[in-house]
Image (cartoon, helix red, strand yellow):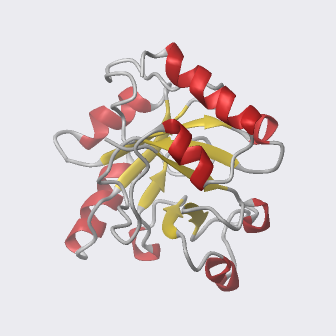
Amino acid sequence: MSFRIMFDSVDPTQIPAHAELVAGYIDGPKSQWPDAAWTMFPKAELVRINVTGDPSHGGDVLDVERFDASPADAPVWFDARTKAGAGGLTIYCNRDTLPAVHEAMGKRSYFRWIATLDGTLFIDGYPPLEGPAVVQFAGAGAAGRNVDVSLVMSDYFHPAPSRPAARSVADLLVRTQATRTELGQLEALLAKYGA
């Protein structure tokens, strides 16, 4: 398994230009990125987030949180997107809404992107640093700008085969041009969970 870092923001100018994985918004009255924003990251793997639950808008990820899609919207969106030929679909939620998402999604196979935003990477019911596919562990306060930071633990979540995978935390952070402080913070988080 390898680790990758993904950035997301309602303001694409806040995402580091060197990011390898970038998540942005395809709909929503306050979050939709302009078309030009998607071209700001020519070397990144792009992840498109749907916040309304309307499958006609597309997207790779459905954002299930307050003021966005609901857990009940998740299977409708997922089934319609699957029927349209989309693969690698993901449901984004937090720890509190995860049980409702699991119940609504039933036996469907999908990636889980779980927000903690408190620096923790462990989600009950998943092996530490092996699941879920993605954990959004740091928000704007920790990042120092209007961006959220996620650790991608699944090699199958938006793979970028043209790039070698990071095999260690140090390799990951060097490739993302992290500072020594950032390296220490992430290493401390990973050490906390025995990685």
**Quadrant assignment, res 134:** top left
The quadrant of the picture occupied by the N terminus is: top left
Give me the residue at 54% from left, 70% from top: 44
Give me the residue at 32% from left, 19% from top: 125
Residue 64: x percent and y percent? 50, 45
**Quadrant assignment, res 30:** bottom right
The reply to whether residue 47 is in sight is yes
Residue 84: x percent and y percent? 25, 76
Q: Is residue 34 above or below residue 73?
A: below
Does residue 149 appear left or right of residue 93 in this picture?
Answer: right
Q: Is residue 195 above or below residue 31?
A: above
164 or 110, which lies in front?
Answer: 164
163 or 21, which lies in front?
Answer: 163
170 or 17, which lies in front?
Answer: 170
Give me the residue at 51% from left, 37% from top: 169
Give the number of callouts. 0
Residue furthest to the left in view is: 107
Does residue 44 appear left or right of residue 75 in this picture?
Answer: right
Residue 59: x percent and y percent? 44, 68
Residue 148: x percent and y percent? 67, 46
The quadrant of the picture occupied by the C terminus is: top left
Give me the residue at 69% from left, 85% from top: 36
The reply to whether residue 120 is in sight is no
